[in-house]
Image: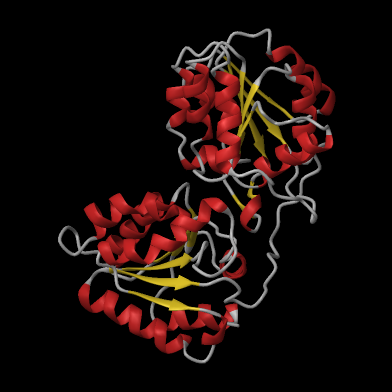
Amino acid sequence: MINCESFLIKLNDLGIRFYTGVPDSLLKDIGAYIADHADSSQHIIAANEGAAVGLAAGYHLATGAVPMVYLQNSGLGNTINPLLSLADQEVYSIPMLMMIGWRGEPGKKDEPQHIKQGRVQNALLDAMEIPYRVIDHSDAQTIDHTLQDLVSIAKRENRPVALVVSANTFAPYKLQHDVKTNFPYNREQALEVILQQIPAEAIVVSTTGKTSREVFEIRKKQQQSGATDFLTVGSMGHANQIAVGIALHSNKPVYCLDGDGAVLMHMGSLAIAGLSNANNLHHIVLNNGAHDSVGGQPTAGFEVDFKAIALGCGYRESYSMSIATDIEAHIRSLDKEVGPTFTEIKVNKGARKDLGRPTSTPLENKQKLMQLLQS
């Protein structure tokens, strides 16, 4: 395995001293090491991967140096526009080193939402004419040469290059500078309260990551079919727009169970939801101030005023709360309110170590929900 400290030292030796991106489970060790050892002027956790390319471009314009952008390959699509219309050699010709976690690598077991992405990832890089190298846990002795090779190309040709990282490449490292909170609920506990209080016929659209896994587990524990649920296993940041699309074409109440990182990723969608006139839509954001599903690195969730932002985006009502009794009573009363409504619930980060995954396929989930909605 590659030691995180020596990896960062080599990047510094090559003149890379600015890091930005969106955390990834395969890169959580090196991501945590960067978070602990780079100051706020050197490291920015971006709202989304395309924005990270923009931040990297701005850094290069100001300094002339090469930045690093890190991401999971599921976010590669968010980077395509700025990579091709901003950083490309035929446009502004901006060098950067991208570090991409290879979820869904062929031959390795992974979740359904990652399989296709993993299979086509390198073909996408080829199509964008981005030079890349693949590394895994066996490359500890050659990583210095690989990095030097890639950074040399980036500097010499003024272009983006990519380091594609297989699972278990970096040696374990635990995030040291962690934010501690003391709210009454963690996310799963809050979800259980929500699912108990909303109407039985309500449609639930849950965001990607552990939120959808926990919704599935709660339904299983309560011996419910989950036919009313759309578990958004991928497409981070788009759950609320899925919910808007359903709400505008259904008479059933629709509850979007979202996360702070997901909302921040595509926050412009709040304006579309707020101005949608979907009077049956209730948008609930479980804010733990962290990218909990991919290593626990912080988001800006505790630093922004979601309640005010939602009101500014046109939601009819907006709330923020963390007290258990308030949450239970509020969720129970939401069905009587005219939407779209927005509710922020502050929770502690963390999840059960034995948290399971949906046993039904995404296609089965879709078909059950569509049958219910169209009956």
Whether residue 232 appears in this view of the structure is: no
Q: Residue at x 30, y 82 (%)?
A: 152
Q: Position of residue 185 (x, y in %)?
A: 80, 37
The number of callouts visible is 0
Q: How is the image coloured?
A: secondary structure
Q: Is residue 339 left or right of residue 131?
A: right
Q: Is residue 356 left or right of residue 37?
A: right
Q: Quadrant of the N terminus?
A: bottom right
Where's the C terminus, which quadrant?
top right
Q: Residue furthest left?
A: 90
Residue 75 in view: yes
Q: Position of residue 120 (x, y in %)?
A: 39, 61
Residue displayed at 47% across by 47% down: 47
- The answer to which image quadrant residue 160 occupies is bottom left
Residue 99 is drawn in which quadrant? bottom left
Q: Residue at x 73, y 19 (%)?
A: 198
Q: Position of residue 279 (x, y in %)?
A: 54, 10
Of 368 and 100, which appears nearest the observer?
368
Placement of 217 over or under 145, stated as above or below: above
**Along the line of sight, the residue nearer the viewer: 41 or 60:** 60
The answer to which quarter of the image holds residue 230 is top right
Residue occupying the far bottom of the picture? 141
Q: Position of residue 324 (x, y in %)?
A: 83, 28
